[in-house]
Image: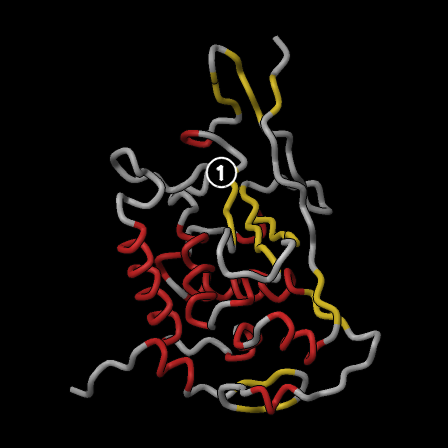
Amino acid sequence: MPPKKSLESTLSSVPFTLNGITSQTPSPAHLEETVPSSAKFDFTAQMRLLCNDVTTRLPEMRHIQMERVALSYTQTRKAVLHGVHATLTPLRFLNGSKTTKRSGKTYYIPPICDEQGQEYLYVLDFYMPRFLETNLKEKLITVFHELWHISPNFDGDIRRFQGRCYAHSGSQKNYDRLMEKFVCKWLARKPPAALYHFLQFRFAELKNRVGRIYGLRIPKPKLHLLAS
């Protein structure tokens, strides 16, 4: 039996197409491309295509209904690696409840809806340009990491593990090792490379390729006190 390919070797061996140019793993020499000043790239729309594929192609993620997950683009002040790269915000509380009690008071989160008026149950937020300043492997693991936080019941609550560290099962390293296995399993099912290879680039490199990078921006959901 041939040895299993590592995630790094799998990612580096797949050709990709961006702006009509097919290449292997990009180097700075590939980035000297002039784009029209009017060119732009909808980051959240592209991320939705990627997440749609993950949640249909990978059995472990099929409980997720991406039409009820809002994707958001948050601008960070600096393109530094330290800090939050992405977050998943649940729009419901324990077991999908619409309210929660704190210090004897009842709170709720105002609904966030799509253009058709359907309520979202989660907000998946990417912090830019920070998210793009890591390598492709780390970006994919981050995407899977946040998606896996979604409750198996898809009720607006997060996936809860036993113990005090209910969000990461007591070990974020083990959690991310599982995410790496999921990424490998997803890649083995041969998703179109065009879905994810824009993530090969750091922010400035991608901008040189596609022009202005933008996306849907959703304010961070806040708790509101429910009137008695």
Give the x, y percent position of residue 182: 34, 64
Say which amino acid is labelled 1: Gly
Give the x, y percent position of residue 41: 71, 70
Q: Residue at x 37, y 42 (%)?
A: 159
- On the rendered structure, is 72 left or right of 174? right
Residue highlighted by disc 1: 156
Quarter that holds the N terminus: bottom left
Between 56 and 2, the one lying in front of the other is: 2
Indicate the quadrant where residue 219 lies. Answer: top right
Between 49 and 219, the one lying in front of the other is: 219
Circle 1 SS class: loop
Above or below, 214 relative to 17: above
Between 144 and 116, the one lying in front of the other is: 144
Q: Residue at x 57, y 51 (%)?
A: 125
Quarter that holds the C terminus: top right
- On the rendered structure, is 5 left or right of 138? left
Give the x, y percent position of residue 49: 58, 65
Count of numbered marks: 1
Indicate the quadrant where residue 14 lies. Answer: bottom left
Q: Residue at x 54, y 85 (%)?
A: 16
Between 121 and 109, the one lying in front of the other is: 109
Give the x, y percent position of residue 184: 34, 71
Above or below, 182 relative to 112: below
- On the rendered structure, is 127 left or right of 62? right
- On the rendered structure, is 92 left or right of 110? left
Above or below, 89 relative to 18: above
Q: For mark 1, does the 10 Å Cα neighbourhood hold few (<14), some (14 to 19), or many (20 or more) residues?
A: many
